[in-house]
Amino acid sequence: MKQSRTASLFAATLLCASVACPLFAQVTTVTIPPDIRKLQPPAPWEKIPVPPLHAFHPEQPTRIELKNGLVILLEPDHELPFINGSINIRGGSRDVPADKTGLIDLYSQAWRTSGTATQSGDQLDDLLASKAANVETYGDIDSTSVAWSCFTKDEDQVFGIAVDLLEHPAFNEQKLRLAQQQEIAGIVRRNDTAQGIAAREAAVLVYGKDSPYARQPEIATVMGITLDDLKGWHAKTVVPNNIIVAVEGDFDLAVMEKSLRAAFGGLPRGPAWPKPSGEFAGPKPGVYFVNKTDIDQSNIWILGLGTTRRNPDFYALTVMNEIFSGGFGSRLVQDVRTKQGLAYAVFGNYGASFDHPGIFYTIAMTKSATTVKTTQAMLKEIHELKTEPFTASELASAKDQLLNSFIFHYDSKDKVLARATELEFYGYPADYLTKYEAGIKAVTLADLQRVADKYIDPSRLAILVVGNQANIGTPLTALDLGPVRPLDITIPMPAAMRRQMGQQGAQ
Amino acid sequence: MTVPCLAQSLVQNELARFEKRVTVKVLPNGLTLIICDRPEAPVFSYFTMVNVGDANDPSGESGIAHMFEHLAFKGTKDIGTTDYPAEKIALAKVEETYAAYDSEYRKRVGRNPEKLKELKAQFDAAEEAANKYVIPNEFTEIAEANGASGVNAETGLDATQYFWSMPSNRLQLWAYMESDRIANPVPRQFYRERSVVMEERRMRIDSNPIGLLEEQFLAAAYIAHPYGRPGVGWMSELSQITATEAAAFHKKYYVPSNIVIAVVGDVSPADLSMLEKYFGAIPAGPKPEPMTTVEPPQVAEKSVILRMPTQPLFLEGYHRPSYLDPDDAVYDAIQDIFSNGRTSRLYRSLVEKQQIAADAEGFTDFPGDKYPNLFAFFAVPNAGHTPEEMRVAINKEIEKLKTTDVTDAELEMFKTRARADLLRGLADNQGIAQELAYYQERYGDWRQLFLQLNKINAVTKADIRRVANKIFVPSNCTYAMVEYQPPPKPPALPQAQPSPGPQAPAKGGAR
């Protein structure tokens, strides 16, 4: 089992440190006249036949809506003797009060580790491990979930545990404390890497410090969360009309339907979970700086507000993204990485989330001495989205990339189910993928120009640099974008804890 | 006992099913092709495994295997150029001017700054001239415009691997591209790519506490074998690698007999003749000689302390033999029992019971598995706890393993999970391609993917104690720790001005 290590995030980072991927990658904006090939005989690869792709219409999941509003999606797949399922519940970290920030992290950990009314979490661990099965609970920004995976023969028992966790959780004090401790271990380490700092502060700049999309758990908020908070959250969210159950694998459709109806049919309907709302003003333009003295590379993030997928311009923006920064084929990567050799990691995206505006980001990591030069190159590429007309060959290439690889959105049954679950969760039509494909196909050069004009506004961007002030050389004021605002990233630490940590401190 | 027997028969069924779907062909030039028919969707994934990694980097050229991997995306004699014959001449000039610059640059005594500047200008001009012929990134452009997904590569210390997925009507196009870049890579824009890789090193190691800890730890744990060198290379050596050296490396190691390629998905044995046409055309070459260096037995316990402004970490390792050792599966068992999930010993002891660590685990095959390597332990102390506490607690668990048999339940859990992990891994084309190529390359037979379970099933409690007593001894141990040290007082920013904005709290002295 050489290839299948079970490694935590930490060890995974460690193990990958010696592996190097050229992915964050490469591309071309035609510095060579685009038609040069046409003047020559066809290149060898252009002579290779590309036959029509075999027809492929994967079966969509069976959708069942129970009387109490719970939705079930079933996708049988008999290739391997496993069953994988998830119970997805609306409501997540964006929905908790500010002074309880961190609640969902603690809830989703203690939920599973505490166990159920009849079996402790430790007992469940032993039982499931002996069957090479999993039942785990998760928390996210807009949802929580229970997921299970097991051999077909163990389905009744393992699914039973998942349902038991849903209906009879036994949140206990000891496991809550363990979760708090782990959460705090993460908080005191959150300034240890430049990338971690940048990702966190970027969200703060775009959404605002107190926004549910940016706020951070602090030691004080984590310590203030009680068992009653966990129980209260559970009671409030576990309501069938806010739940989607998705199952994939080696089962008989009718048998599975019966089993799920029996498990969930009796849950009483509750209030519908409110739709997300909020004001999104975008970042306050300017240059922001975090000084980190132990690194010799700057993380540069240029930030603005993105959009949602409901925006009719989403398709044109997606094609624009592909030209700007997609895969190996973009203007940004071409210039900053390939032509100038300034960065290994460089990427960008006009972000579009399902139900709230995403982040428009352009990111590069470069040695301290080329911080300003790289920032200028990135800004130039953003600016040129408006001033350098998109070419027909850029449009064609971006569409080819998006459409020819489109099948990888649904080339296996678990992907088909995952897409369908996502659409159901956010209330998008089931034929969304078909619409998406048509939407991309319809994008014109005029559309690209229009969305670049409408959505790209360099005057509304914030620039965040996490770097080593002493080595940067050319000061950030040379960007000519006003004063540089230092960001305070000190981790607030209760006095008692500061004493306990003694010499170790926390930055 | 019915559970493991049932799972075992499932594995046997899978092997039988794969026997019907897998075709292996060793081409006359020595290249091994594996195809596996899995026709669920009209797509395929491939995995090219070249049996060379950064452990094979010549002395003074650490990082070259990885550097070459980057080069493999730069195109070929046909792809990525407007005029290869002219470009070839221009690239020769680049090498010539670089060599002149380099030999002046490396002078320890009597380096002439004026001359160096002039030579650099000549090199820059030659690079500029060669760039005129480049169609940048055309190789990846063609792949992606044809629907390639997950285009990437990895260089480890043991091997270099290339992979992506594509719609299956592009199988022939892929065979053309992959065989062309193996046979005919062109070192275009080499020196700019070298700058990119230097940034990669800064990101992964120089600006990353865990990367730095790992590098220092391995450098201490190994005194002879190249597992002690960072895969990405030491900055001084990486920054002086030349395209000429990369070409020599390619000539020696990228020979067909050193390459296994697996293709999985909507492919069939009928495609073999087409594939053979492309891959069979790669010129044969002598198989590279095996490495002579064997890490000598460790004779002294070693420790490394890094004092940095970062939270504490702990890493410890013990030398073990390579994957070919008869006890290989025993190390897998020890890894599983120490680390697999919430039932594992390190989790239950350090995380749950003593509550001194946020995470703790032991893992084998570090930093590779082809050569004798390390069984390592990694722990992340909780706030207020020290790396030394991790060391003590881990050593207690090691002692327990040496003196007391593991339980029946633990051993059975390991075996059941090994079977389940194997089967779960058979669910996607890319994963299957990787496994088939790996086992074919390492054992000369992809069936070992399934047959390794026999070794796993044979592991006994006595084996675990025996192996633990053999390797977990102080003279075989190296440990490294990060201890927190406050950063120097930051200099006041000249431009620093408090901002009234709520989004930019500017209290000064930011850390």
Image (tube, rainbow, N blue to C red):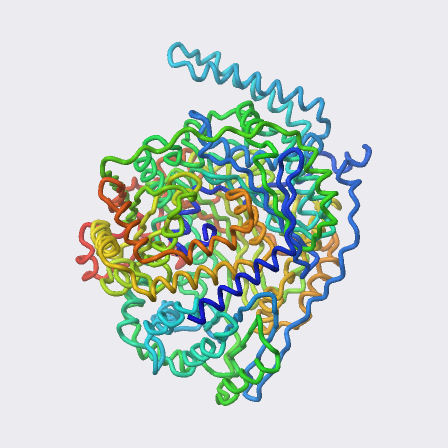
x and y percentages locating residue A158 in the rendered image: 45, 75
Q: Is residue A71 left or right of residue B231?
A: right
Q: Is residue B474 left or right of residue B93?
A: left
Outermost residue, top side: B110
The answer to whether residue A478 is visible is no
x and y percentages locating residue B338 in the rendered image: 32, 57
Image height of B119 relative to B221, above or below: above
| Residue name at image x 46 percent, y 14 percent | B104
Question: Could you say which quadrant of the image residue A297 lies in?
Answer: top left
Q: Is residue B283 left or right of residue B103?
A: right
Image height of B221 relative to B312, above or below: above
The answer to whether residue A442 is visible is yes
x and y percentages locating residue A191 in the rendered image: 34, 51
| Residue name at image x 21 percent, y 60 percent | A497
Q: Is residue B251 left or right of residue A367?
A: right
Which residue is more in the foreground, A43 or B172? B172
x and y percentages locating residue B231 in the rendered image: 44, 37
Which residue is more in the foreground, B291 or A123? B291
Count how many numbered circles sit on residues in the image: 0
